[in-house]
Image (spheres, helix red, strand yellow):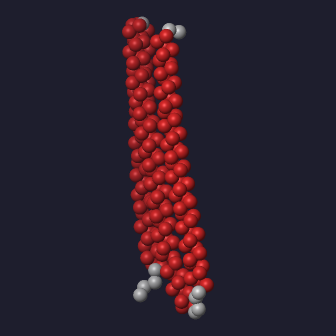
Amino acid sequence: MSTIDLEQLAQSQKANAQVMMTLVRTAFHGLEQLSALNLSASRELFNTSTNGAQQLLAVKDPKELKDVAASLARPNVDKLLEYSRSLYELAANMQREITSVMEDQYSTMRHNAAGLIEKTGVGTPISGDVFGAAMKQMMNASSTAFENISQMAKQMTDIVDSNVKAATSATAQAAAALTPKK
């Protein structure tokens, strides 16, 4: 193996290690955000439950019980909706970050493969033409597949986004129906 090949291999390994580190950092950052979100939601649930229990224990007649129970329902539904939105935003942000890293990595790989195809074709013109044509065809097929997968991921994100919005709207309407009318 020549020193150029060893240098290229070392550069490739370094680039792969950087990509992996970026993905691991993204995962850790997402887990930190998820932990903070869950801790905050748990604290809020505990405080709300404690306050709600105290209010329910202070009830003296059945009509008041109905009003207190209804007044406790609306804030809990709002908090659930906020938690769901935050969870969705966290997942969507992580998906975008990971997709961005993967797109960059794929672009770099395509560039390197194109350079290799060109280099191989120059060294051995006859067999290089066959190899180059096969590699170019494979690169075109993989590009098409990658673009299709990226498009599918975007469509799935859009579908989930619209479903979350629809569920949020429906839940908000249901919560509004629980709120006592004065």
Residue nearer the viewer, 52 or 92? 52
Residue closest to the far bottom: 61
Q: Is residue 160 visible?
A: no
Q: x, y percentage for residue 165?
A: 41, 61
Name the residue located 42 percent from the left edge and 53 percent from the top edge: 159
Q: x, y percentage for residue 80?
A: 50, 66
Residue nearer the viewer, 101 or 29? 29
Q: x, y percentage for residue 31?
A: 54, 49
Residue nearer the viewer, 152 or 66? 66
Q: x, y percentage for residue 112?
A: 42, 22
Is residue 92 shown left or right of residue 39? left
In the image, residue 23 above or below residue 160 = above
Name the residue located 38 percent from the left edge and 15 percent from the top edge: 118
Name the residue located 46 percent from the left edge and 80 percent from the top edge: 179
Q: Is residue 175 visible?
A: yes
In the image, residue 181 above or below residue 11 = below
Give the quadrant of residue 140: top left
Question: Could you tell me how many numbered marks the image carries?
Answer: 0
| Quadrant of the image containing the C terminus | bottom left
Name the residue located 51 percent from the left edge and 76 percent from the top edge: 73
